[in-house]
Amino acid sequence: MERHFELELEKLKKRILKMGNLVAEQVHNSFDALLRGDNELARQIIEKDRKVDKLDNKIDKLCQTIFALTQPVATDLRLIMSSLRMNNDLERMGDHAVIIAQKIEGISEYPDILQELHIGEIVNMTDMIVNDVNTILNSRNTTFVKDIFALATAIEEKVEAVNTRIIEEMMHKNEVIVVATNLIVVLTSIERIAGYSTNIAESVVFIVNGTILKHKKKNFETQAGAESTPPSAEEPLKESADLPTSEATPSEG
Amino acid sequence: MKEAKIITRDLTLHYGQKMALNSISMQIPEKEVTAFIGPSGCGKSTFLRSLNRMNDLIPSVKITGEILIDGLNIYQKKIDVVNLRKKIGMVFQKSNPFAKSIFENVAYGPRINGINNLKILTEIVERSLKNAAIWDEVKDRMHDSALGLSGGQQQRLCIARTLAVEPEIILMDEPASALDPISTGKIEELIFELKKSYTIVIVTHNMQQAARVSDYTAFFYLGELIEFGKTRKIFTAPDVKHTEEYITGRFG
């Protein structure tokens, strides 16, 4: 049934996964290059961003075609809407990997500074979040979405603390201003990568059960017993899953 | 949700031995558009025709349960079916104008109801044609045969004919399925306008049409009501997997 349409959807899913893998690799390499001061790897990341951009355009175009030709509804509609959003988020993550790569040269002259500021820890946490998001993109298992949100919050707090420390250093030592500025840019990119990762996790939840978590992550994080199923958003989308046995009033949406 | 105009309770209908509707309970809101969807033979048209007792015309039909319109059970013995159908207009898949003039087609119902004053009839005809969004196209040829109109115009004329007897409910059985996209668009626009004054129930096989024109959607399958809810929810995140499979074209 609807074989052609199914093929198009499969193509879209594959392209999103490919984009996810490509961006995860770019982000991972940018972190690796940052920690090792590897300018050659940084150059390769900048070079490879073209691939990300090209795939970004291909996914956008495919979504446009599916919308125009098939008028998708329900789960198909959610998949395509979310694919557009995730594609955008992934592309932005790729851009931040490039920003990190561009700043490596200026930072690699000060090999000890990353260790002093425990930036390796932040980088590892962010690498973890990107991997987790890639996993749920693949599996559609939303069980640990809550952990992703918690991890992103932890990253945000750590980045803020390190930034405060950097600014204090800048106030006292003029000679660190350039490297400190580069570091602030890098940390901002790391934080944004974590932020985009949570957006993607939200999109996966939306695909799976139609729940809109956008701007509601805080509620979700504090919700007890939400390990397996994210809570309904403001407008509950799941109300009565059974066949109507008594008088059916239309379920509100 | 607005107040229910039509309430059905455990409505079961048999054609001879064959059960066509199984215990359908539903509340259809007033002055909204409710669409019935489902594969052929699912019972949606049968259910629609039960709402104005058109199934009474089929001898083998047996109905149990209740249909209340404005709280009144329309299957009570004392109900005058002719009066009931005045309150509930119906538009069919195939437009069926009478072989009379455009004017006489619309004036037909009011005449049957005893209105013979030409001035009043002219007012009713003009108002009905305007409300059916066809006045501008026919105002200069009111006495031409209705059969000379295009398919889309004939369908809107039939809607005007329905409006002329001032119903409260309009039942539409695939009203645009035989029309081109432009005429279909006009009918859909008309439905949107009419819902301000009428409760509309529409049967359609066209998913996009159901999504575009209706406020509520009911999905029927094998004589059962599988899901009934706000259209925007049914077409974005339905509760029942069966509904999802049908509207996404994966079965049916």
Image (spheres, coloured by chain):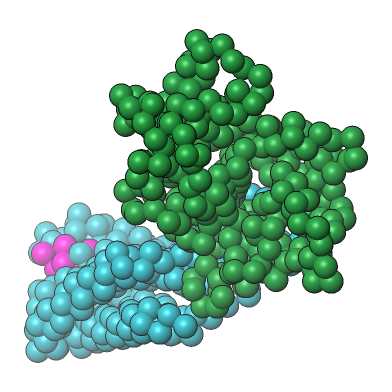
Chain colours: A cyan, B green
Q: How many marks?
A: 0
Q: Is residue B214 above or below residue A159?
A: above
| Stretch of the chain drawn in magenta | A178-184
The residue shown at (80%, 45%) is B67
Q: Could you tell me residue B209's position as x and y percent?
A: 46, 54
The residue shown at (48%, 23%) is B125
Q: Is residue A171 left or right of residue B37?
A: left
Q: Magenta segment: does it hold A181?
A: yes
Quadrant hosting residue A211: bottom right
The residue shown at (19%, 85%) is A33
* B165, A78: nearer the viewer: B165
Q: Could you tell me residue A160's position as x and y percent?
A: 35, 60
Q: Is residue A127 left or right of residue A217?
A: left
Q: Magenta segment: does it hold B151?
A: no
The residue shown at (89%, 35%) is B78
Q: Is residue B77 above or below residue B250?
A: above
Q: Does residue B166 show up?
A: no
Query: Hey, which residue is sitting farthest right in the picture?
Result: B77
* B73, B244: nearer the viewer: B73
Q: Is most of the magenta stretch helix, strand or loop?
A: helix
Q: Does residue A2 show up?
A: yes
Q: Could you tell me residue B99's position as x and y percent?
A: 47, 39
Q: Could you tell me residue A63's position as x and y percent?
A: 30, 70
Quadrant hosting residue B75: top right
